[in-house]
Amino acid sequence: MTRFALLAGTAAMCLSAAAPAIAEEEIGFVFEREYRGAEGMRVSGETRDLRWHGPIYSEETVRTESGERTELEFADSTRISVGENSEVVLDSFVYDPAQNSGDAVISFGKGVFRFVTGDMEKDGFTLNTPSATLAIRGTIFVLKIDAVNNVTVYVEEGAVEIFPCGGEPALVQAGEYGLTPANCTGVSVRDGNPIFDDPGGERRDDNERYSDDSSEGGNGNDVDP
């Protein structure tokens, strides 16, 4: 059994078995100052606008349509920028700041994303896509999942190991991209960045984090990005 199948299958079985007993946990917040139309749907069925500093929850589905986007920050300062026409499920995120350890499962369904790792040990992440599972190594990368589930990963910093739904895994280094076709025929690695869609979320210095000061307009409606 491939690592893709094992990780995806184990995550699905665990979530399915545990779902009735697990309450939705707050796992981070919306980092995008300006509201750009993104919505979150919780397990309860509640759908809400994802506005600046609003909480995000385990098992929540984040969706955007044309022209929309958002950026999320998790408990360890990991950030995910969500571009337009995208969908991602925040399955779980457990973090121990004393040890910088934890366990996170995130399932990217479609669209374009930028992923910037935070403080948690990188082997704590399970990143699922329709055609591959991703293992990260201190990483900034852009991910695109097209309409037929072809998966492209461009690495800006660090490295990403791709475990495809069929074929051998491949390591993608900074400045390279890996393409995993939906027909599960393996991974091809090439130089350059073929992803022209911009998910937003340019890298920021920690000193540029937005303040909690409510005087800056906490609802994100009238604050410049």
Image (tube, rainbow, N blue to C red):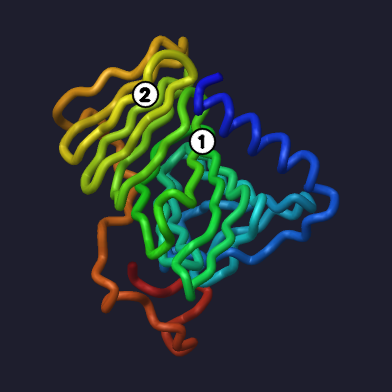
Q: Where does residue 98 sit, x and y in percent of width and height?
A: 48, 75
Q: Which residue is denoted by mark 1 in the rendering?
A: 128
Quadrant holding the C terminus: bottom left
**Would you place residue 27 above or below residue 148 in this image?**
below
Q: Residue at x 50, y 43 (%)?
A: 126
Quadrant in the rendering for residue 136: top left
Quadrant holding the N terminus: top right
Q: Is residue 11 left or right of residue 149?
A: right
Secondary structure at badge 2 equals loop
The amino acid type of the residue labelled 1 equals Asn
Q: Where does residue 84 sit, x and y in percent of width and height?
A: 43, 41
Q: Where does residue 142 sit, x and y in percent of width and height?
A: 32, 41
Could you tell which of marks 1 and 2 lies nearer the N-terminus? 1
Q: Nearer the viewer, residue 131 or 198?
A: 131
Circles 1 and 2: CB atoms closer than 8 Å: no
Crowd rating for badge 2 (residues with CA inside 10 Å; few <14, some 14–19, many 20+):
many
Q: Nearer the viewer, residue 118 or 26?
A: 118
Q: Residue at x 33, y 19 (%)?
A: 187
Q: Residue at x 84, y 54 (%)?
A: 21
**Picture disc at residue 167:** none
Secondary structure at badge 1 equals strand
The amino acid type of the residue labelled 2 equals Pro
**Would you place residue 100 above or below residue 197 in this image?**
below
Crowd rating for badge 1 (residues with CA inside 10 Å; few <14, some 14–19, many 20+):
many
Q: Which residue is denoted by mark 2 in the rendering?
A: 169
Q: Residue at x 45, y 63 (%)?
A: 73
**Would you place residue 2 above or below residue 137 in this image?**
above
